Amino acid sequence: MSRKKTTILTLHEKKARGEPITMVTAYDYPSALAADRAGLDSILVGDSLGMVVLGYDSTVPVTMEEMLHHCRAVRRGAQYAFLIGDLPFMSYQADRAEAVRNAGRFVKEAGMDAVKLEGGRAMADTVAAIADAGIIVVGHIGLTPQSSARLGGYRVQGKTAADAQRLLEDAEALQVAGASLLVLEMTPDRVAETISRHLRIPTIGIGAGAGCDGQVLVLHDLLGLFDRFTPRFARRYADLFATMERSLAAYRDDVVGRRFPTAEESFPMDETEWQKWASGLTSEPPR
Ligand code: KIV
């Protein structure tokens, strides 16, 4: 059977059938191509790119232009996955009309299928405005990295009964406002599972246990590409940073030791043409 482009309906049908939804972040053409070929349902161009690709200390400095640049590269690599672009900090919080315009840029200029934004009931009107403009919106509650300073750092959210209830009400408010998917980040597994059962829309967990309707991981955590830390909840499937460092050191050693390039890695010149040219050279070229 030929593979079809994943749509928001595909993801909702998966929830209805109880089939897990698979999502990973990607930030460029090769990682998007690999995720698409691996059969991931969805790719999130997360603002985590600020940390894992651009080397910022947090996601706060990421700009709209940086996000759009990476979204366009992902779009060129992914043919089938459902593509979500992350609205960066201060592109949607200050002004609802600006939020709609910025969301529109992800769809119109970067070919995204949906946009994601962080926040609970306080963002419900913004979610409604973007959804009313015909754009698919993904909510994000629990740990919301753009406001981690206000949350006291990267901490598990919803650990008390009152906080868990607040998260459930946030989730319901976002669903009513028109969100089509919901990311739950760093919440106790029982809280995430309960929220997932209460909602009609699929939940995608990251550090939120096995009871969500799907899972997302940051590509660089999964591949071992981030040098600073790997969150406790992430599973590492490779150690590509070490592979990259070893490969670069081997290349450097080969160049210094004159083992690279070999004749097989060079282009020969026709002997007659070489003789014609070399015999006309008046002096040895300087080395
Ligand atoms: O930016 C990101 O990668 C995210 C995920 C952690 C969900 O928002």
Image (tube, helix red, strand yellow):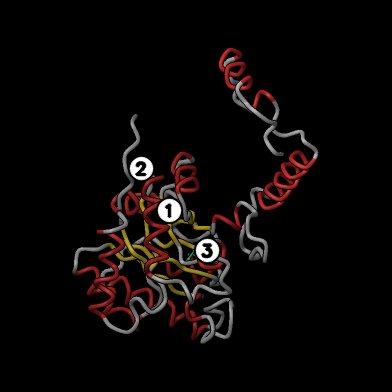
In the structure shown, which secondary structural element does the residue marked by tag 1 occupy?
strand
Q: Residues within 10 Å of mark 1 (few under 14, many from 20)?
A: many
Residue 43 disc label: 1
The residue at 47%/56% (across/down) is: 27
For the residues carrying marks 2 and 3, which lies nearer the camera in this image?
A: 2
Q: Is residue 216 left or right of residue 244?
A: left
Across and down, in percent, residue 140 comes to 42, 70
Q: Residues within 10 Å of mark 3 (few under 14, many from 20)?
A: many
Across and down, in percent, residue 174 comes to 32, 74
Q: Is residue 158 above or below residue 36?
A: below
Identified by mark 2, the residue type is: Gln
Q: Is residue 58 left or right of residue 230?
A: left
Determine contact: label 1, label 3, CB under 8 Å.
no
Q: Is residue 107 above or below residue 7?
A: below
Q: Is residue 255 left or right of residue 144?
A: right
Circle 2 residue:
79
Across and down, in percent, residue 223 comes to 61, 51
The disc, 1 or 2, on the residue closer to the chain's N-terminal end is 1
The disc, 1 or 3, on the residue closer to the chain's N-terminal end is 1
Q: Quadrant of residue 107?
A: bottom left
Residue 206 disc label: 3
What's the distance in space between the residues labelled 2 and 3, CA to CA? 24 Å
